[in-house]
Structure formats: C-alpha cells, structure tokens
Amino acid sequence: MVITLLTDFAPPEWEARISAGFDAPTPNMSAHVELQRWLAAEALNRAWLGQIPAAERALSASWILNSSLRERPDLISQLIAIAIARIQVGLLRRIPVHPATWRNHLAEHDYRESLLKAIEVESVIGFRRLPEGLAWFDRATRADFLDLRRAFLVRLRDSPVSDTPPAVPQPERRSAGEIIASMSEPNLVDALGRVDRLIVDTELTERVLALRQFKEQRGHWPAEPSELRASRLQGAQWTYRAGRDGRMEVLLSRGPRWKSRGLVLPIRCELE
C-alpha cells in the first residue's frame, strides 16, 4: 500500500514557513527514516528473490519520498535527504535496475547546492534572533555576525569537493556577534563533508550504471571509458580495470580520507 501510494499518486509535500524561523514545521524525521529503511529492505529482499520489477518499484518509492525533502530550506531536512540518498546510491549498485532511467534520476538534484541554500537560510534565521535594538552594542553584534557569516558562506561555496574540510580562520578578537556566528560553523563544515562524500558515492554509482548500459547495448565492456574518468573530488579521478574473466572493476585513483560517520560505502565496485 505504501509503495503504491508513493509511486502512483502525487508525492508528499511538507509545509515550510521560513518566516517562522526555528519554529517552522518540519516532517517527522524519525518516522521518515524508519519508512526509508523499510523501503530499502523491501527493495533488497525483492531483488534477492529475483523479483527485479518489484525491487525497482520499492526503490522508486524511496526516491520519490526523499525528493519531498531535498528541496526544503531547513538544514535537518537536507541532512536526512543526504543520508537517505547515500543508501539509495548503494542500492543502485546492488540491484539490476534500468541504467538509463536511474542515470537520469541521479542527475536530477545537486545536494551541495541545496545544502548551501539551507545554510544560508539558517544564517538569516540566526540573524533575526539577534537583539534588534538601536544601541551601539546591538548594532555592532548584528554587523559582526553578518560580516563573519558572509565570509564563511563564501568560503563554503567556493571550496572544491574534498575529503578534507575547508579551513575556517577564526578572528583573534571575538565580539558577541562573531562568537554567535562561529558557534555553528564546525557542524556546518561537517555537513559539507557529508554532502561531498555523497557526491563521490553518486559518481561511482553513475559510472556503474553507465558501464552496465554500455554492456547491455554492445554486449561487452568499453575498452577505454575515458569520458567516465573525471571526478569532482579534488585530486582524484576514476580508473577502470577489465579482467580476463569478463569482469570490470571501477575504483578511485586515491583513497579518500572521509570521517567514519554514518553509512560508509565502498569506493570501488566490481561488475560481472
């Protein structure tokens, strides 16, 4: 019933009122995560039973449900959407789905862009919670908050996709506004690291699907998939090894130094 509701009807919409700040309504995230775990388990179980259409349908339901979060402007929705997307790109490597369809799905959304927008929205909400008085202290607090947070947002926006967090220099002298602005910076840098790891995980899955699509059309692996070598990860590219036993291995040219937090997908994949 749940899968039918998600795949045959309009996707759910969650109310968002940015003007309400931290009091704005958000979906029940614990229930959302539990439902996503069930859909992932259902997809894997159906695939194990050889029921590939049913497995892909469960995965489609999961994808539609997650798409209802990824455009939301709040940070918690973005973090949950990123975590679920990592499960999904892992499943796509295991389940023999239709490659062309899912390659298009993987290109639908830029999680780095939506995360940065959510951080910007959170910054505006934080600014609105500062004292609004006309006293010099209140005005200086707001000005310092804006200056430090603007520089921080620009640094995040301009940083390359990387497995090491961008450096965030701290001022020697901190005013009240600077202290408030810097309190959440470590968590926001960590969030950027999570989305960068998802970008690389998605790249590997996209390349797995591209190779499967090529083999479906040609009956063999590509001799030199040069167009699939580029990676957004700084200082890395994808490499390919075709074995004599008819297998194809895809792996990154260097081992990323991700923080071991949450689901960690392998950075290599072997295809038969």
Image (cartoon, rainbow, N blue to C red):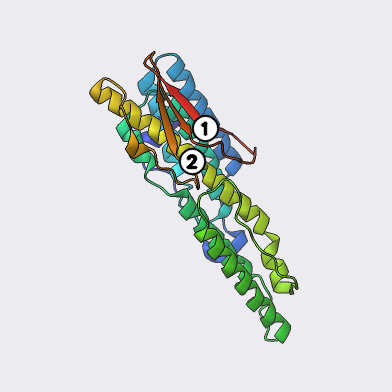
Q: Which mark is residue 101?
A: none
Mark 2 and 1 residues: CB-CB less than 8 Å, in contact? yes
Mark 2 or mark 1, which has the lower sequence index? 2
The reply, left or right, for residue 52 in relation to residue 192 is: left
Q: Is residue 146 above or below residue 251?
A: below
Amino acid beneath label 2: Val
Residue at 43%, 33% in the rendered image: 239
User: How many numbered circles are shown?
Assistant: 2
Q: Quadrant of the N terminus?
A: top left
Residue holding disc 1: 267
Distance CA(mark 2)–CA(mark 1) = 8 Å
10 Å crowding of disc 1: few (<14), some (14-19), many (20+): some
Q: Is residue 207 above or below residue 172?
A: above
Specify whether residue 223 is in view: yes
Q: Is residue 153 above or below residue 27?
A: below
- Considering the numbered disc 1 on the image, is that residue within a helix, a strand or a loop? loop
Q: Is residue 189 above or below residue 138?
A: above
- The x and y percentages for residue 228 are 36, 37
- The x and y percentages for residue 233 are 49, 45
Residue 144, quarter of the rendered image: bottom right
10 Å crowding of disc 2: few (<14), some (14-19), many (20+): many
Residue at 44%, 19% in the rendered image: 46
| Front-lying residue, 104 or 229 | 229
- Considering the numbered disc 2 on the image, is that residue within a helix, a strand or a loop? helix
Residue holding disc 2: 200
Residue 183, quarter of the rendered image: bottom right
The reply, left or right, for residue 1 in relation to residue 29 is: left
Amino acid beneath label 1: Ile
